[in-house]
């Protein structure tokens, strides 16, 4: 976003929290929608917390459906605090099969980090790529952010493929930058900036 003086404009405070969280359509009758406090979404979040790959790469665990509901409430609170905005990846009208969103949002600085995971039964259909693309377009073109990062362990080539297919350029390797259950990992840093081709 450029203001009338030709200087990059910051995204004003309140822009992320205003109104309802948008529902973003995805191909194939799927969508990115806010997480719901119903049994279907709580079950999906609980299941994700038990999945070895999701918990390993995201340091994520959920011990009960009650804890899952508490986490869903915190996701909504993060949007109101303008520190993040997280969507459920779901078939239209159905329960969540994944998560995608923006973390570490800095409206004044124009930056955020993209994150995602997909439940095992929904993997292999390109959902993470579609979600990352759609969120990136929304964040850069509609919210008005300038730069998005996508980081992952160098030992996670699947996330590297998602980043590249979603239009993120690899910028380098950060040494010993991510702590996972098995210790510190080097991470690849990918980024997209406003005006990059998709």
Image (tube, rainbow, N blue to C red):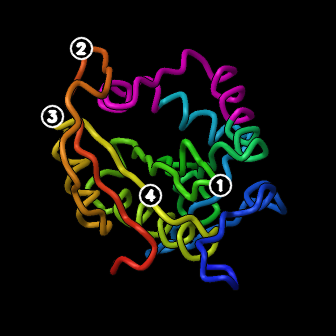
Label 4 to label 2, Cα distance in Å? 27 Å
Q: Give whichever of 19, 6 is nearer the camera.
A: 6
Identify the residue under disc 1.
107
Q: SS at mark 3?
A: loop
Q: Residue at x 30, y 69 (%)?
A: 167
Residue 94, horizontal then vertical, whole percent:
60, 56
Residue 91, horizontal then vertical, whole percent:
53, 62
Label 1 to label 2, Cα distance in Å? 33 Å
Q: Which quadrant of the figure has residue 45?
A: top right
Viewer-nearest of discs 1 and 2: 1
In the picture, which quadrant includes the N terminus? bottom right
Q: Residue at x 57, y 61 (%)?
A: 32
Magenta span includes 179: no
Name the residue furthest front.
5
Viewer-nearest of discs 4 and 2: 4
User: Going from the N terminus, do you reach mark 4 or mark 2 first?
Assistant: 4
Label 1 to label 4, Cα distance in Å? 12 Å
Report the magenta residues as a range: 48-74
Vertical side of 63 occupied by 20: above or below: below
Q: Residue at x 59, y 72 (%)?
A: 8
Q: Give whichever of 99, 154 is nearer the camera.
A: 154
Q: Give whichever of 46, 170 is nearer the camera.
A: 170
Q: SS at mark 2?
A: loop
User: Going from the N terminus, do you reach mark 1 or mark 3 first?
Assistant: 1
Identify the residue under disc 4.
148
Residue 35, horizontal then vertical, whole percent:
66, 47
Identify the residue under disc 2.
182
Vertical side of 93 occupied by 29: above or below: below
Identify the residue under disc 3.
155
Vertical side of 115 occupied by 43: above or below: above
């Amino acid at each position: 976003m450029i203001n009338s003086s030709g200087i990059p404009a910051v995204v004003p405070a309140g822009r992320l929290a205003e109104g309802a969280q948008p529902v973003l359509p995805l191909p194939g009758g799927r969508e990115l929608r806010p997480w719901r406090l119903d049994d279907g979404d709580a079950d999906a979040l609980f299941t994700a917390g038990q999945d070895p790959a999701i918990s390993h790469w995201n340091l994520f665990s959920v011990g009960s459906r009650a804890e899952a509901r508490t986490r869903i409430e915190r996701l909504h609170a993060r949007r109101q605090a303008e520190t993040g905005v997280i969507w459920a990846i779901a078939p239209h009208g159905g329960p969540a099969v994944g998560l995608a969103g923006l973390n570490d949002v800095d409206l004044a600085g124009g930056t955020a980090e993209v994150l995602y995971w997909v439940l095992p039964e929904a993997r292999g259909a390109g959902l993470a790529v579609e979600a990352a693309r759609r969120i990136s377009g929304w964040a850069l073109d509609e919210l008005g952010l300038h730069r998005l990062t996508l980081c992952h362990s160098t030992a996670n080539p699947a996330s590297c493929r998602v980043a590249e297919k979603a239009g993120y350029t690899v910028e380098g390797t950060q040494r010993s930058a991510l702590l996972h259950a098995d210790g510190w990992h080097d991470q690849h840093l990918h980024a997209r900036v406003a005006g990059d081709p998709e």
